[in-house]
Amino acid sequence: MIKQGDTYSHKVKFTQADVVKFAEVTGDFNPIHLDSEYAAKTIFKKPIVHGFLSGAVFSKVFGTLFPGEGTIYLSQEMKFMAPVFVEEQYEARFEVAEVNTEKHIGIVNCSLVNSQNAPAIVGIAKLKNDTQFV
């Protein structure tokens, strides 16, 4: 059972192939994600990973690892603090801020940090899981 104060972390690295697949699925072909010559002229100097692809790691963790199977997303707030780049190591971090055992709902602080421990994304998720938030 998951309780207030519980933490979890998960390492993630995005590839350019991931970025291309995401662009194909969403139709977001912004050259900042796909064209290194274009990206070199921006403040980032190289292509960046789509924000929602970066944030999708939260969905992966919530649905399969922590709390895991049966989790239903009720809401997700995300603030994009810094760019995410392909082939760099990141860590998704989670801390349970609150649990409502009557409604089986958890409020989870989540972040994606780079190898220097700087946040790329920070947010708060509201989740329902009838077997874990009890």
Image: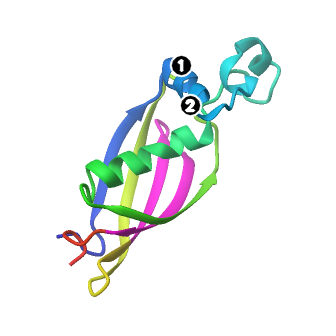
Please state, as top left, top right, bottom left or bottom right, where the N terminus lies in the image.
bottom left
Circle 2 sits in a helix, a strand or a loop, which is it? helix
Q: Disc 1 to disc 2, how far (Cα)? A: 14 Å
Q: Which residue is mark 2?
A: 25
Work out whether residue 21 or residue 44 is closer to the camera in this orientation and state it. Answer: 21
Q: Position of residue 53 (x, y in %)?
A: 54, 38
Vertical relation: 87 (above or below) 69 = above
Residue located at (59% from left, 31% from top): 49
Residue 117 visible, this orientation: no
Disc 1 residue crowd, few under 14, some 14–19, many 20+, Cα 10 Å = some
Vertical relation: 118 (above or below) 21 = below
Q: Is residue 108 magenta?
A: yes
Question: Hey, which quadrant is residue 90 in on the image?
Answer: top left
Residue 22 visible, this orientation: yes
State whether the magenta stretch is mostly helix, strand or loop.
strand
Write down the region rendered in magenta. 107-128
Badge 1 or badge 2: first in the primary sequence:
1
Q: Position of residue 96 (x, y in %)?
A: 35, 69
Taking the image as shown, residue 56 lies to the left or right of residue 10, namely: right
Residue located at (25% from left, 55% from top): 68
Q: Is residue 121 magenta?
A: yes
Q: Indicate which label's residue lies in the foreground, 1 or 2.
A: 2
Residue located at (74% from left, 28% from top): 30
Task: Report if the CB atoms under discs 1 and 2 are less than 8 Å apart.
Answer: no
Q: Which residue is mark 1?
A: 16
Instruction: Count all numbered tags in the image, as a single digit.
Output: 2
Q: Residue furthest right?
A: 41
Residue located at (54% from left, 56% from top): 122
Disc 2 residue crowd, few under 14, some 14–19, many 20+, Cα 10 Å = few
Circle 1 sits in a helix, a strand or a loop, which is it? helix
Q: Amino acid at mark 2?
A: Val
